[in-house]
Image (spheres, rainbow, N blue to C red):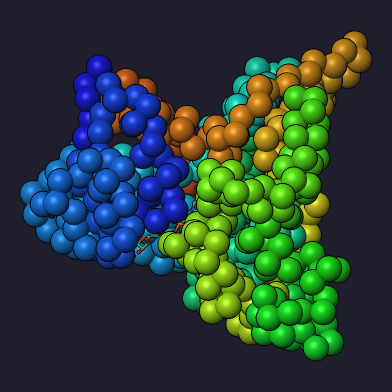
Amino acid sequence: MARLQGVVIGAGDRGLGAYAPYLRKHRDEGRITAVAEPLATRRQAFAKRYDIPADRQFESYEALLAGRRLGDFALIATGDALHVEPAVLAMQQGYHVLLEKPMALCEADCRRLVEVSEKTGRILQVCHVIRYAPLFVALERTIRSGELGDVVAIQHSENVSYWHYAHSYCRGNWRNVAESSPMILAKSCHDMDLLYWLAGAEPDRLSSLARPTELCAENVPDGAPLHCIDGCAHAQSCPYDAVAMYREMLPMLRDLEKTARPMLLGELFRLVRRWRPLLEKMPFEALRKSAHWTGWPVSVISDDVSPAGIDRALRSTRYGRCVYRVGDNDQVSSQTVSVLFSNGVNASFSMHSTSHREGREIRVDGTRGSAVGRFYLLEQRLDVSDHKTGAVRTVKYPLSFAPHGGGDFRLFAGFLAAVRGEAEPVTSARESLQSHLMAFAADRAQREGVVMEFAGGIARPVPPLST
Ligand SMILES: NC(=O)c1ccc[n+]([C@@H]2O[C@H](COP(=O)([O-])OP(=O)(O)OC[C@H]3O[C@@H](n4cnc5c(N)ncnc54)[C@H](O)[C@@H]3O)[C@@H](O)[C@H]2O)c1
């Protein structure tokens, strides 16, 4: 097997931890040879973890891409607004590109990326990791096998937990539509991609409705301080208390406690939640350390994830703010999208921000059978039922602690195989364009109250009926 070399652009949360660790486990497949990251602490941490020599550490993608090509592929994990230029430059330099979603923030840039990929002959794969989660792989195969007959309807929901919404879409980087992008693109381009992939046809018509966020100034509880850590009287009753969220990890543990399989795992998380305060008081440092979670989302709020560092972030950053007093957050709190595909598949999608558990639920109903899938943080389960016999086939997937049900590593493995020329990528830049067009259309539909129609790859509002 050819051993590939890759460069990483943007060594933040995803650049450091989502895909690159795969190559530490599968050294025969390749290695990371260079990194571009403006923040010194992140750049150094990355370089240390992946053995990158000093002359291959760059302060920006411009510097890395200015010299000679340093690898076969570029993994681009910069923030949403900084995807297009590095991807274009990298492809023009001859790199195959694995690009984080969303591919771009506007239609013209998405089209530009597709054009450059097709012109240069470089693979441009957008990180639609959900396609690689075992449940969705099995669901797509079930549909294509004909087991469900003709697919009539897809109902899909993205149940964003109240704590994840508060973290990313109220306090975090995606809180403001103008400075980032609408949640239907930022979060749900995965789901638009899933609908398009499962339906197996191009969209024909699309409509959408949304509800604004309730996490705003008019709902501030009486007397709540700007930062939760400054003694909020509502801390015990407020589900969004930042101290409970980042210091104690209570919302996430409560979510994980709902894990039903394997038996007792939920109970284990319950025990962790109960005993964690005791561990914090233990005389041994190792035990005290074990009481502190330092991964996502804590790693996002501060590069210093020590208890003191977290407290500092709770006092001084938006992540510590009262969720009703962030000030400039305007992401919707729920959005529904209806899509009629050109082959007659009628799909409805619901994204909301107040789920007790983080996960997705989907059902696909056809003339011969129904498939119902549940995709939660640690659990995936698919039930396929046959209309004629009534038989139900249940697929339960082994427990996976990997993000997106293991989709991240599978996606990266698939990308490397495509770069080696051993397999076709599961999805192309042109296919990703389609899901992004759906997201742009859904955003416009909900803002302008119009129904969108797709013709010749262009989405336009359906003209109103003349009366
Ligand atoms: N596929 C998925 O399911 C998934 C999940 C989460 C996030 N994402 C996407 O991944 C991307 C990265 O997210 P993140 O949470 O890691 O963000 P992050 O902010 O932690 O990381 C981005 C990094 O890019 C660096 N950067 C900024 N300018 C740069 C430049 N000129 N050259 C090189 N690096 C530069 C930043 O300093 C930062 O460290 C985002 O687009 C996000 O939407 C995808």
Q: Position of residue 161 (x, y in %)?
A: 73, 55
Residue lying at the far front in this picture: please name it.
283
Can residue 264 be seen here? The reply is yes
**Foreground residue, 247 or 54?**
247
Q: Position of residue 292 (x, y in %)?
A: 59, 51
**Foreground residue, 204 or 215?**
215
Q: Quadrant of the C terminus?
A: bottom right
Q: Position of residue 222 (x, y in %)?
A: 84, 87
Q: Position of residue 458 (x, y in %)?
A: 51, 58
Left or right of 329, for residue 35: left
Residue lying at the far left in this picture: please name it.
68
Please give the name of the residue rendered at 58% of the width and 39% of the height, measured from the top-left corner.
Answer: 404
Please give the name of the residue rendered at 37% of the width and 27% of the height, measured from the top-left corner.
Answer: 25
Please give the name of the residue rendered at 44% of the width and 53% of the height, measured from the top-left corner.
Answer: 13
**Foreground residue, 24 or 465?**
24
Q: Is residue 69 above or below residue 5?
A: below
